[in-house]
């Protein structure tokens, strides 16, 4: 196996840091952790203190306005969200990591092609990120001895965007996501540790007067900069929302059947994004060029089998069909879409039947217009 030059350099740097098997100080340890993380495929690593300042007040205000919709879990464990030491006692520092996932250029597809958020086309990121965090913790232990830690990847009451901002991995964009000079196509993960590692400095924001992300939202889900009404967000509607999708919003979903990338696609900083290096996030099951009618024909068994290991699987077959029915209703009039919808007209789920009926009526109205 070829060893890249940066790996050789890293080994030399770490070797120089070591003395009698131990790292000299916390700054050297931080540098070593960054190098080890890179060797494990992590794109960037920074360090935050377990203190979130005024971020909790902003969350409380957002929840008080009901902008979280049905995401009741957001309103639970608020003390643990605001105070990391309440979540993991003894936490002295938090190692915040970034893992890039952008797949290579995707085909545009036609009007009958499904649109799926890029993060969901490959393997479930929760497992991939946590596995690397666990390996990183074990590597640190081999150098400094046992210490307390817990790994998180969008899997607990952790305000990860705010922690990443405080650690200097980026700044909060007006679309509420973490943004950096190399874009926003990445996952975040955290290691809460008992190690006394000094925090890194936050970055200044670099959005300026740009509001491209806000204007790009198909459903006008942004109330203003840094403020999202989740109840109108397509990612929320197609993933988190369990009931019928509001009729007035359905035409705005287009062919989006799982998530939405529009605000990220509109961001000028994403012009500098590079594809992720891990094969885990490459498109699977042809999801980058699938026809809506073909996906709509999947049985529940096919849905579960084909999407095993995918984040999409967690929405279940019923929501999958609900979302695709809306997308089929938004396609230009064509007999293939109508035939696919007719085949599900008597589906066992009342939610699926209602969305199918809506979509068929859309096609009928368009045909007679």
Image: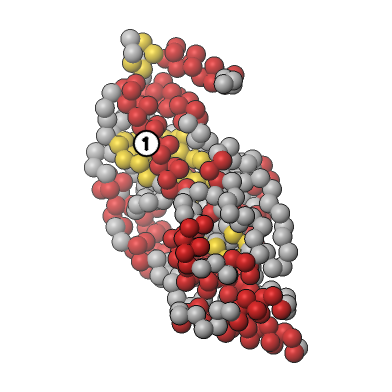
> Which residue carries the number 1 mark?
134
Q: Is residue 236 left or right of residue 64?
A: right
* Residue 162, above or below 324: above
Identify the residue at horizontal 26%, vertical 27% (top origin). Answer: 146
Counting the numbered discs, the total is: 1
Where does the image place residue 125, in percent across and percent down from the top left?
47, 47
Q: Is residue 176 at least partly visible in the picture? A: no
Where does the image place residue 170, in percent across and percent down from the top left?
53, 42
Identify the residue at horizontal 29%, vertical 52% (top origin). Answer: 80
Is the image coloured rainbow, by chain, by secondary structure, or in one colour? secondary structure
Q: Is residue 339 left or right of residue 153?
A: right
Residue lying at the far left in this picture: please name it: 89
Q: Quadrant of the N terminus?
A: top right
Where does the image place residue 236, in percent across and percent down from the top left?
49, 65
**Residue nearest the viewer, comparing 283 with 91:** 283
Identify the residue at horizontal 75%, vertical 90% (top origin). Answer: 368
Q: Is residue 183 at least partly visible in the picture? A: yes
**Residue nearest the viewer, comparing 270 with 9:** 9
Q: Tell me the crowding category of disc 1: few under 14, some 14 to 19, or many 20 or more residues within 10 angstroms, Cα based.
A: some
Image quarter of residue 47: top left
**Residue nearest the viewer, comparing 7 with 248:** 7
**Residue nearest the viewer, comparing 116 with 165:** 116
* Residue 300, above or below 29: below
């Amino acid at each position: 196996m070829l060893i890249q030059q940066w790996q050789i350099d890293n080994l030399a740097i770490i070797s120089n840091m070591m003395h009698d098997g131990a790292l000299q100080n916390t700054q050297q340890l931080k540098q070593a952790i960054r190098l080890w993380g890179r060797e494990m495929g992590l794109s960037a690593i920074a360090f935050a203190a377990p203190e979130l300042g005024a971020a909790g007040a902003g969350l409380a205000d957002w929840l008080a306005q009901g902008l979280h919709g049905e995401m009741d879990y957001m309103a639970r464990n608020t003390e643990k969200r605001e105070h990391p030491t309440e979540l993991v006692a003894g936490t002295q520092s938090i190692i915040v990591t970034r893992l890039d996932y952008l797949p290579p250029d995707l085909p545009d597809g036609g009007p009958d092609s499904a649109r799926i958020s890029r993060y969901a086309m490959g393997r479930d990121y929760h497992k991939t990120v946590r596995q690397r965090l666990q390996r990183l913790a074990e590597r640190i232990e081999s150098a400094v001895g046992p210490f307390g830690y817990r790994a998180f990847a969008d899997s607990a009451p952790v305000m990860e965007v705010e922690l990443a901002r405080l650690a200097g991995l980026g700044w909060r964009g007006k679309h509420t996501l973490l943004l950096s000079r190399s874009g926003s196509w990445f996952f975040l993960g955290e290691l809460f540790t008992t190690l006394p590692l000094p925090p890194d400095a936050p970055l200044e924001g670099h959005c300026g007067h740009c509001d491209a992300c806000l204007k790009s939202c198909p459903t006008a889900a942004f109330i203003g900069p840094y403020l999202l009404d989740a109840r109108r967000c397509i990612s929320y509607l197609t993933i988190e929302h369990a009931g019928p999708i509001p009729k007035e919003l359905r035409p705005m979903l287009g062919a989006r059947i799982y998530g939405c990338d529009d605000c990220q696609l509109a961001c000028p900083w994403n012009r500098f994004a590079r594809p992720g290096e891990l094969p885990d996030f490459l498109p699977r099951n042809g999801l980058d060029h699938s026809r809506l009618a073909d996906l709509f024909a999947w049985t529940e068994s096919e849905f579960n089998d084909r999407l095993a290991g995918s984040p999409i699987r967690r929405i279940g077959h019923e929501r999958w069909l609900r979302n695709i029915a809306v997308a089929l209703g938004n396609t230009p009039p064509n007999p293939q879409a109508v035939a696919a919808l007719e085949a599900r007209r008597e589906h066992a789920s009342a939610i699926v039947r209602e969305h199918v009926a809506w979509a068929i009526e859309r096609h009928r109205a368009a045909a007679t217009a």
